[in-house]
Amino acid sequence: MAHYSFTFPPMGGGLYLVLCVLVAIWAANRGRSGLRWFLIGLVISPLLAGIFVWVLKNLDRSIMDGEISDGTHVRCPECREFILKEAKKCKHCGSQVLPPFPNHKNE
Ligand SMILES: [Zn+2]
């Protein structure tokens, strides 16, 4: 009759692990280390780890949309990865890249 007293705590046992795995999968989908985030979730809490992944994801997106795309970076014409504007060679695919404004300077 009283079998279920310790088998279903809200944040214990299986559910905790499942949440850690979900955070790890989510982090891996964001290009991060799934294993690392799984361990972080285990050590602190999967909910906190999930919040961190979410915040980091937003940081990444703001970098992709802002800083990198129109600031100091351009897209490689060959592989479409972001590379430094001054780069002569793409670090991703190794192809030669000609800067759009060679030696352009504002006095
Ligand atoms: Zn490239």
Image (cartoon, grey):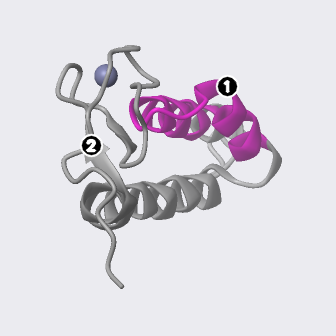
State left or right for residue 28 relative to residue 33: left
Decide which of 22, 103 is in the foreground and name it.
103
Q: Quadrant of residue 88?
A: top left
Could you say which disc has been placed on residue 68 in the image?
none
Q: Quadrant of ligand 1?
A: top left
| Quarter the C terminus occupies | bottom left
Could you tell me how far apart the alpha carbons at marks 2 and 1 are, in whole angstroms?
Answer: 39 Å
Is residue 14 shown to the viewer in this render? yes
Residue 35, by quadrant, is top right
Q: How many other residues sit within 10 Å of disc 1, few (<14), some (14-19) or many (≥20)? A: some
Identify the residue at horizontal 69%, vertical 45% (top origin): 41
Residue 100: x and y, percent? 19, 47
The residue to which callout 2 is attached is: 99
Question: Where, quadrant-wise, is the N terminus in this rendering?
Answer: top right
Foreground residue among 71 and 88 = 88
Element under disc 2: loop
Q: Nearer the viewer, mark 2 or mark 1?
A: 2
